Amino acid sequence: MKFSYPAEKFSVARSNLMLPHSNGEASSIAHAFHECSLGLHELDRDELEEVAADWVRKLEELMDTTGIADPDERGTFAVRAEQLSVDQKIELSRIIDELAHWFERENRDEF
């Protein structure tokens, strides 16, 4: 049960990245960022395997909103999502998918 909440949140984040993006790709990414941030909020990083901890570090780098200006008050995740390169979007999608699978497997193995 220790990974049930992150498993749920990363599953939703992965779904947000799937087509179609009815409100635009950046909006879908921003929603995925939000779900990931919820899933990571109270996560005990010491419980993660090395590979999962690595994915989390890379994800947090991609999600980092430090220094991002949001004069239109759309949300810093939305602004950050618009700044991602194609390569970063590919990496983001892969990392979220890997973490969703990892949390699901760990959650399932607890039973």
Image (cartoon, rainbow, N blue to C red):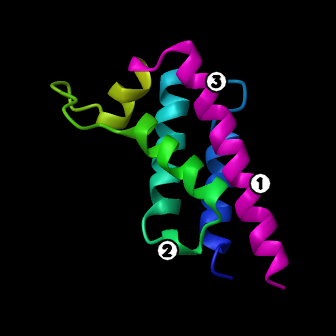
Q: What's the magenta region? A: 83-111
Give whichever of discs 2 and 3 has the lower sequence position. Answer: 2
In the image, is residue 12 part of the stretch drawn in magenta? no
Q: Residue at x 83, y 74 (%)?
A: 108
The circle drawn on residue 90 is: 3
Residue that numbered label 2 is attached to: 44
- Locate residue 53, reporting x and y percent: 56, 57
Work out whether residue 107 can be spotted.
yes
Q: Nearer the viewer, mark 1 or mark 2?
A: 2
Mark 1: which amino acid?
His
- Give how far apart the Cα atoms at labels 1 and 2 are: 18 Å
Residue that numbered label 1 is attached to: 101
Quarter of the image holding residue 83?
A: top left
- Give how far apart the Cα atoms at labels 1 and 3 are: 17 Å
Q: Count neighbours of disc 1 (C-alpha within 10 A) and say few if under 14, some if 14 to 19, many if 20 or more.
A: some
In the image, is residue 89 part of the stretch drawn in magenta? yes
The one nearer the camera, 8 or 42, is 42
Secondary structure, mark 1, is helix
The dominant secondary structure in magenta is helix
Quarter of the image holding residue 105?
A: bottom right
Secondary structure, mark 2, is loop
Mark 2: which amino acid?
Asp
